Image (spheres, grey):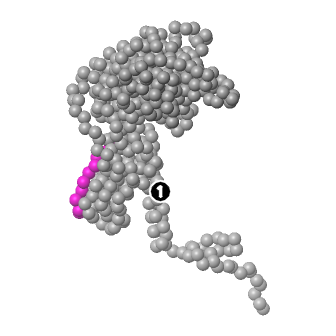
Amino acid sequence: MLDRIGKYRVIREIGKGATATVYLCKADDREELVAVKLVDFGDKNRDQGKWSRRMRKLFLTEAAIAAKLDHPNIIRIYDAQVEENRAYLVMEFIDGQPLDHYCEFNTMLPLPRAVSIVFKCCMALDFAFRRGVVHRDIKPANILIGANDLVKVTDFGLALNISKEMDKDSTFIMGVGSPAYMSPEQVKGYPLNQKTDLYSLGVVLFHLLTGRLPFRAKHPAQLIYKIINADPPSASQLNPEVPEAMDRVIRKALEKDLYSRYKNGAEFAKDLSSVRFKILDDNYVAPDTTRFSILRKMPFFTEFDDIEVWEVLRFSSWRQFQDNSVLMREGETDSRFGLIVSGTAQISVGGRLLAELGPGEVIGELGYLDPTHARRSATVLATSSMAVLEISPSALILASEECLEHFRGQLISTVVKRLVRANEALAAQGEEVMLPTESGFAVASGIDLELLPDTPPRR
């Protein structure tokens, strides 16, 4: 543990990234605490090569650009020192959390607060652009939230000084940024302007309001394809609390066509403000995690991400049934299906018992998988008090692509497993058959019989 960095006494480490460590420090000549970002260029005996030179450029860029940006929503820089093997940046200390802390569904902010935070970011980016600076790496981790929703945009190390000529600007490095938040022109490696930051901030807004990114993929190439070609889902469909007017704001921020996107942060902020003042209810109740915890432990949801489980809770109904209640009746037309959360049920066809099912089992899935035969093929009767997660196809169709894919996969797997068990049960009632083997025929019972070769009869 370091004791000092220059004239700054180290109190504790408060953050660590791939290239730098941030410490909480106290200056000998300053009353308030400061954050010191330390970049180690490596052992001087080691070949540092391009990495060391690039790190020095990024550090000096952040120091020079931040010195130009005196704005209440941009982190203040007090000092910058470059030494032979290291460099450090001294900035104001914000006692708070990076914005990514609030992007998980169970820690999401009330809608008015989320909009207010992005509004302040819009104004900070507008100010930076008017000073000739494009951030190029806007993401929740680079936005600090302090007490009373104090907002500070940080980490201008990848910023572009557009007042310089592009081909002479040593800080212009193609492809910088965080892939999930990059604009179409950024992933293509095109020249950038302030609109790339507004696109990235639109992704941040979507993430804050829905708890998920607009474009997700298992592979970088697939993610890039979606960013360039796919339309983002509707935030209001993923989170019913989001007004449809916000969908229009997000769509404009995420426009792939530069001419259709917001031209500056002030314009983005104005539209956000108009939606914000239409939101009358500032009362917010944090989501109950009890039901999430129950579903999370069920094998059915093993392949679902946490955010997809929260999504399921949003569009489904949690229903209670008493003992001897009929949940589904044979012959009825209905395509809703359910997942037994607790309790047990009997499945019968034509008044005859087919199966007994318990927690984690699916009921009524055939009507959803084959809508052309939506009539119930069986009756489901509760044999104890039950809790059932009921899902309507009309609600499920609004789910995210990933959630839908997982549902279909699990339901098809359920049907296949039941078909295999049904085949085994039917086979147990069938007649034994002769099956070919290498040496002849065998009865299906498992007893091998060998047929003797033909021999001429004795005379």
Residue 149: % across, % down: 31, 26
Instruction: Find numbered disc 1 in the image and state the secondary structure of the residue it sits on.
Output: helix
Which amino acid, by three-letter code, is at mark 1?
Val
Task: Please tell me which residue is depicted at 45% across the width and 43% down the height of the picture.
Answer: 405
Residue 406 point in image, percent of width and height:
44, 45
293 and 142: which is toward the camera:
142
Residue at the outermost front position = 28
Q: Is residue 243 above or below residue 375?
A: above
The x and y percentages for residue 245 are: 31, 24
Residue nearer the viewer, 365 or 87: 87
- Residue that appears at 24% across and 56% down: 321
User: Which quarter of the rendered picture does the C terminus lie within?
Assistant: bottom right
Reading the image, the residue beneath label 1 is 416
Q: Which residues are drawn in magenta?
A: 315-324
Q: Magenta segment: does it hold 314?
A: no
Can you tell which quarter of the image residue 40 is in? Answer: top right
Query: Looking at the image, can residue 136 be seen?
Result: no
Query: Camera-side residue: 334 or 407?
Result: 407
Q: Residue at x 42, y 19 (%)?
A: 29
Residue 102 in view, yes or no: yes
- Within 10 Å of disc 1 (Cα), the crowding (few <14, some 14-19, many 20+) is few
- From the viewer's perspective, tell me whether residue 135 is left or right of residue 289: right
